[in-house]
Image (cartoon, grey):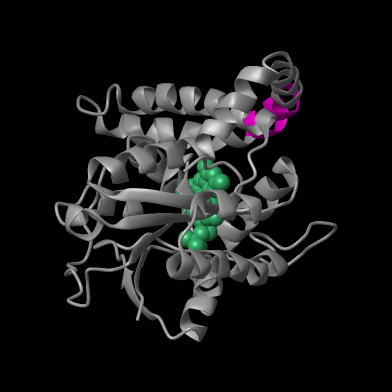
Amino acid sequence: MKRILIIHYSQTGQLTGLLGSIATPWETRGYRVDHLVLRPKVPFPFPWSRMSFFDAFPGSVGRVPEGLAPFDVPSAGPYDLVVLGYTIWFLNPSIPFNSFLEHPLAGAYLKDRPVLTVIGARNMWVLAQEHVRRKVEALGGRMVGNIAVEDRSPNLVSIITIVRWMFRGRKDPFLFFPAAGIRPKEMREASRFGEVVARWMEEGGDVGRDLMDAGAMRVKPALLVLEKRATLLFGKYRRFILARADRDPRSRRRRVALLSRLLPIGAFILSPITALSTRILSLVRRGAIEAEIRRITTY
Ligand SMILES: Cc1cc2nc3c(=O)[nH]c(=O)nc-3n(C[C@H](O)[C@H](O)[C@H](O)COP(=O)(O)O)c2cc1C
């Protein structure tokens, strides 16, 4: 009997649903599927207030670990596969998931194990995944593949629907906007990835490549260029938020409040301009970007 351990953190349950869909073929085949659900010692609010949401920015961008409720390595191991499910917060692995990666026990789960990552996010996860991949390998795990399921709406549309979802707790369609988050069809069809993984567990082969062929990762060149630019800006803004925080604790709050105004403006005013410039850049540097995407999507 194959044994699989799924480790994840999901705030609203979207990622839990996605992992459930992927795991369906495993359960049908009678594999033993265990779960380790990560719980922050101090839960994050949902729906978020504007300040609490943006206050998670410095910790997310700086990948600062926070306390998790105690957990033990399940005795059923060693597992044939460890699945790490995570979401993206401000272009980085969410704070609870990153806290797991930095936890002294993380290595005990991952060392010498094949590891599959599953991301459920809006649309920007590539650089976070590069970090997670390096971290898993540093902890002795063997990355075998990645599945990233995203909100397929256009960038600006998904910003509007996700903001309503995060701040009001409402996912439903409104006006001419679609429902927020990953579409139900994408969720259901994610079970095909579970099939690919099951075939690999029983027959061997190159699961990373087979997952790619099944559509497990779609990286858009223009979005990757935009993500890199935003990551650079986020790092700078994080340093600005924390620059005077020791001497003047209120400065952090003021600078987070400013971010909560600047980021939406940045997204809506700069995004159409950057969309054009990143598209041009991605055409000019097409060869180099395509080579980079090939490297990113090869496991
Ligand atoms: C604080 C915060 C920041 C987020 N930043 C991003 C982001 O930079 N890129 C992205 O694709 N999704 C982002 N999201 C969306 C999440 O990745 C995820 O899709 C959403 O929170 C639902 O996940 P859940 O399964 O935890 O409920 C963010 C969500 C939160 C709460």
Residue at left 26%, top 54%? 100
Q: Is residue 272 visible?
A: yes
In x, y percent, where is residue 181? 64, 59
Which range of residues does the magenta coloring cover?
A: 265-273
Left or right position of 232 against 137: right
In x, y percent, where is residue 106? 21, 55
Q: Is residue 267 magenta?
A: yes
State the residue in front, 74 or 197. Answer: 197
Q: Quadrant of residue 278?
A: top right
In x, y percent, where is residue 258? 49, 31
In x, y percent, where is residue 36? 30, 70
Residue at left 74%, top 47%? 157
Left or right position of 174 against 64: right
Residue at left 62%, top 68%? 192
State the residue in front, 210 or 71. Answer: 210
Q: Quadrant of residue 287?
A: top right
Q: Is residue 211 magenta?
A: no
Position of the N terminus, as image quadrant, is bottom left
Q: Is residue 49 visible?
A: no
Q: How many marks?
A: 0
Residue situated furthest right in the rendering: 176
